[in-house]
Image (cartoon, helix red, strand yellow):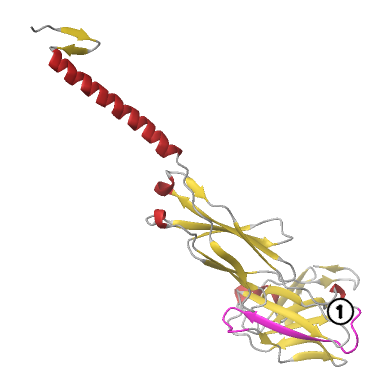
Amino acid sequence: MHYSHRIGHIKVLNTGEMAFNCLDIRCLCIFLIYTAFGYALSSDTEIKVNPPRNFQIVDPGYLGYLYLQWQPPLSLDDFKECTIEYELKYRNIDSEKWKTIITKNLHYKDGFDLNKGIEAKIHTLLSGQCANGSEVQSSWSEATYWISPQGNLETKIQDMDCIYYNWQYLLCSWKPGRGVHFDANYNLFYWYEGLDHALQCVNYIKANGQNIGCRFLYLESSDYTNFYICVNGSSESKPIRASYFIFQLQNLVKPLPPDYLSLTMTNSCEINLKWSLPRGPIPAKCFIYQIEFTEDDTTWVV
């Protein structure tokens, strides 16, 4: 016997067809529940990535130019198709600000003040499609470095002063530390990028048998890069504390004065001054000039 009526929005024609439609509804319900819960489970699954391994600060002997290096984190099999980056932060320990670098490499190099300790930290970054559209960060790996100090602070050199005369030769001078004995002496070592290793001064300036300065007669390709100096010392009576410095030589240039200066008066109210370009390798566009003059030998105007 055939009959027809509606159940909800489903039209049932006979018992066989009703069983078929109920099966469809049940499958649809199961599918919707599975989809909803499956999505929830997927979205709630926490993605984790490990921090870099063997993070360390390495001193190659360049007087403050250090290597920060690490190895990839463990268990990267799940992220073979992902771009792994690292966020590196570092500073001298007494500095308020961290320097921050984002890199895909496994090393980084920079200059540090070795008079103070250094601290650094790094973690792994995972972003984009591999992190469900967000950014996943690992925990931090940390490293520190410092040179074990020898000797009291008062044994360090005083008043270090470096001048790059006419962009041609560098002269550095200092005063001996306080409280050092007559047998104390100091040695200067330097390095800049391009040298295979740190070098010692070969042309010391002396006073009373002590080294109080160094003349650098030729420094190839040393401009516009960090110039690292260490002045340490030796004494039979007490250890001497080493001092470290970082300069950029172009900032220490002291040019020669002009070769000549001429003065002419065109009338009682006008004076003309002319001077020559200073000799040496410094381009003319780099110079500015300061003039001082007086009319009564007591008051100078700049």
Q: Determine whether 96 is above or below 38 in the image.
A: below
Percent coordinates x, y for residue 86 in the rendering: 52, 58
Mark 1 crowdedness (10 Å alpha carbons): few <14, some 14-19, many ≥20: many
- Quadrant in which residue 140 is drawn: bottom right
The verdict on residue 195 being magenta is yes
- Can residue 262 be seen here? The reply is no
Residue type, numbered disc 1? Gly
Quarter the C terminus occupies: bottom right
Residue at the spot 41% in from the left edge and 49% down from the top edge: 130
Seen from the viewer's position, the closer of residues 47 and 212 is: 47
- Quadrant in which residue 198 is drawn: bottom right
Residue at the spot 31% in from the left edge and 27% down from the top edge: 32
Seen from the viewer's position, the closer of residues 21 and 218 is: 21
Quarter the N terminus occupies: top left
Which residue lies under the disc numbered 1? 177
Seen from the viewer's position, the closer of residues 84 and 269 is: 84
Percent coordinates x, y for residue 99 in the rendering: 62, 59
> Which residues are the magenta region?
179-197
Residue at the spot 58% in from the left edge and 64% down from the top edge: 55
In this rendering, position of residue 119 left or right of residue 82: right
The verdict on residue 159 being magenta is no
Percent coordinates x, y for residue 170 in the rendering: 70, 83
